[in-house]
Amino acid sequence: QVQLVESGGGLVEAGGSLRLSCVASGRTGSISTMGWYRQAPGKQRELVAAITRGGITNYSDSVKGRFTISRDNAKNTVYLQMNALKPEDTAVYYCNARYSFVSNSWGQGTQVTVSS
């Protein structure tokens, strides 16, 4: 199995920046795609950004140009640099890892709050 631990959330003013980190442990050699999802109150969990082991990235339209996902395979860590944050970015952010072709692992979530 794969375990994920996120860090880096917090409270920031609109226009500010935050960097989230997610460290994987366990069967890290079997991880393919890693990503960040978010869930705001009363809304469904949605994909924010994802990155393959080879570095191919995918972003939701709402964060393109503002957020950057990156990955350090040697450290089993994925990052999400969030710039120009907006109040609508407020949510719990979850790290996700796909491994062994069909399995998914989730982190515990980290709260990001953007004040207006």
Image: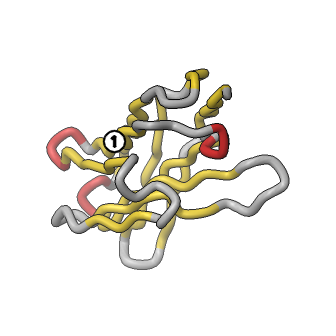
Please state the total of marks drawn on the protein image: 1
**Position above or below: 88 against 9:** below
The crowd level at tag 1 (other Cα within 10 Å; few <14, some 14-19, many 20+) is many
Q: Classify residue 42 by image quadrant.
A: bottom right
Residue 42 is left or right of residue 35, and the answer is right
Label 1: state its secondary structure. strand
User: In this rendering, does residue 96 appear at all?
Assistant: no
**Residue that badge 1 annotates:** 79
Q: Residue at x 36, y 39 (%)?
A: 81
Quick check: can you spot residue 78? yes
Residue lying furthest bottom: 102
Rendering coords of residue 52 (x, y %): 27, 66
Q: In front: 23, or 114?
A: 114
Residue under the image location 74 percent in, 63 percent down? 44
- Of 48 and 75, nearer the camera is 48
Coloration of the structure image: secondary structure
Residue 114 position within the rendered picture, expressed as x and y whole percent measured from the top left? 62, 30
Quarter of the picture containing the C terminus is top right
Q: Specify whether 58 is left or right of 3.
A: left
Residue 87, by quadrant, is top right
Q: Quadrant of the N terminus?
A: bottom left
Residue placed at 67% from the left, 60% from the top?
A: 45
| Residue 75 in the image, given as x and y percentages of width and height | 21, 39
Residue 51, above or below 11: below
Between 50 and 106, the residue placed more toward the observer is 50
Looking at the rendered structure, the kind of residue marked 1 is: Tyr
Q: Residue at coordinates 38% horizontally, 43% vertically from top-left?
A: 80
Rendered view: 84 above or below 3: above
Q: Is residue 29 left or right of residue 1?
A: left
